[in-house]
């Protein structure tokens, strides 16, 4: 059955999208598993923060003008794999846990056809499109692959990181007292009275961002690493997140204080009834009291008591994700569309090396020496 034809509108800047913002917000509510990284506000914060060679903010509409999809792409240039190339990626990357696109259920195949046709005809000098961190249970990536294969486009897929989440019902069913955390809380309270607060107003969050940046940097110094928040550009990114997302109540800054000192702080992003744990830090001087884990327990209790149904614990492996009742979701997908043979070969070699490295500690250590070849972990 042929797909319904779609009208494509190519917008060059986030300001051009403002007139359709209410439609984007309604479409966000219509997709099966919305996250903060699918929101218009997240895309706007990224486009205001990081340089790019041009935006391709794509609106796909049905004949009756219904918004079928919003796919925000940017063209970036830098060293990727072994060469300096220009590539397309989601406008919300590289600091989103999920790839950001909005596709109305039932329109996936038509949008995939229209998107790949746009990329095929695009005059932009891109060598690859890296569509990263897409949910493998979302039908749109599978439609993209199907259309690409039928049209003989060079597209590859790779399994990426996994995400953990915790539903309210599972948390309440498995919530038990933790003797170790209770002891830590008692010992910490001996240093001063404990206070847990969640700030959602933009001015309240902005007032506390500098202390958050300072704690984050101190924590990374203790690990002999450089905090991304040591850079003015990344601090400006966080301020733009607050500027664009906090007015709707979609940024939560939670703080555990001991006396007058913040000992653990966490920035979380809300989308409807889901909360995504985004960035955390704690005071190194209080590390022996497990302040981050204490703060997380308080935040989970607060979240589920205040309308949150699912807490997204984020990508990767770490002890705080080992919550009773937490579920590991299917791996995220990286989809790569290659516009040059050289890029396709480099990508294939890179992912073969990645798989080999994951099986060998020696290769993992050697890989650290080669990190300079890559702009960020892909």
Image (cartoon, rainbow, N blue to C red):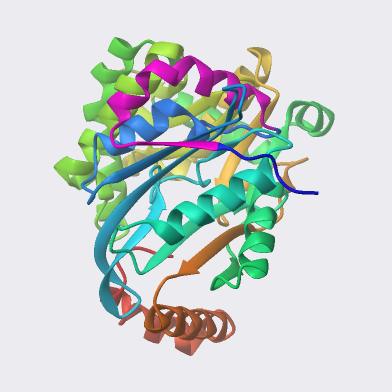
Viewer-proximal residue among 300 and 289: 300
Q: Main secondary structure of the magenta part?
A: helix
Residue 302, placed above or below residue 43 = above
Q: Quadrant of residue 96?
A: top left
- Work out whether 267 lies above or below 376: above
Point out residue 117 in the picture as x, y percentages from the top left corner: 51, 55
> Viewer-proximal residue, 266 or 359?
359
Give me the residue at 74% from left, 37% from top: 106
Q: Is residue 254 magenta?
A: no
Q: Is any part of residue 261 visible from this angle?
A: no
Viewer-proximal residue, 295 or 278? 278
Q: Residue at x 30, y 43 (%)?
A: 55
Residue 324 appears left or right of 343 = right
Residue 93: horizontal and vertical position, in percent? 40, 48
Q: Residue furthest right?
A: 173
Tell me how many marks there are. Answer: 0
Q: Which residues are magenta?
A: 7-31
Residue 144 image-quadrant placement: bottom right
State which quadrant residue 368 falls in: bottom left
Residue at horizontal 55 percent and vertical 62 percent from the top: 335
């Amino acid at each position: 059955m042929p797909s319904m034809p779609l009208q494509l509108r190519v917008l060059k800047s986030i300001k051009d999208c403002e007139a359709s913002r209410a439609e984007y917000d309604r479409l966000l509510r219509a997709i099966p598993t919305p996250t903060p990284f699918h929101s218009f506000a997240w895309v706007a914060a990224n486009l205001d923060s990081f340089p790019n060679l041009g935006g391709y903010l794509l609106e796909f509409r049905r004949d009756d003008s219904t918004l079928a999809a919003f796919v925000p792409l940017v063209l970036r240039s830098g060293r990727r794999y072994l060469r300096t190339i220009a590539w397309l990626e989601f406008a919300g990357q590289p600091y989103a846990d999920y790839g950001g696109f909005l596709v109305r259920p039932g329109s996936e195949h038509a949008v995939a056809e229209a998107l790949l046709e746009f990329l095929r005809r695009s005059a932009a000098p891109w060598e690859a499109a890296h569509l990263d961190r897409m949910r493998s249970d979302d039908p749109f990536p599978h439609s993209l692959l199907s259309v690409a294969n039928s049209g003989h486009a060079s597209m590859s897929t790779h399994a990426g990181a996994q995400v953990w989440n915790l539903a309210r019902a599972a948390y309440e069913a498995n919530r038990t007292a933790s003797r170790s955390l209770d002891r830590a809380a008692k010992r910490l309270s001996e240093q001063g009275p404990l206070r847990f607060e969640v700030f959602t107003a933009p001015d309240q969050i902005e007032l506390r961002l500098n202390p958050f940046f300072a704690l984050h940097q101190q924590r990374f110094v203790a690990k002999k690493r450089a905090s991304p928040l040591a850079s003015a550009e990344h601090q400006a990114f966080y301020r733009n997140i607050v500027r664009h997302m906090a007015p709707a109540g979609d940024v939560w800054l939670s703080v555990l204080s001991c006396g007058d000192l913040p000992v653990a702080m966490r920035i979380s992003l809300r989308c409807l009834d889901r909360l995504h744990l985004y960035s955390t830090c704690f005071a190194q001087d209080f590390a022996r009291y497990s302040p981050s884990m204490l703060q997380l327990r308080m935040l989970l209790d607060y979240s589920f008591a205040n309308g949150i149904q699912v807490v997204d614990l984020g990508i990767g492996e770490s002890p705080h994700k080992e919550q009773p009742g937490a579920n590991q979701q299917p791996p995220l997908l990286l989809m790569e569309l290659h516009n040059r043979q050289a890029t396709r070969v480099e990508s294939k070699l890179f992912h073969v090396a990645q798989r080999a490295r994951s099986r060998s500690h020696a290769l993992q250590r050697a890989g650290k020496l080669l990190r300079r070849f890559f702009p960020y972990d892909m």
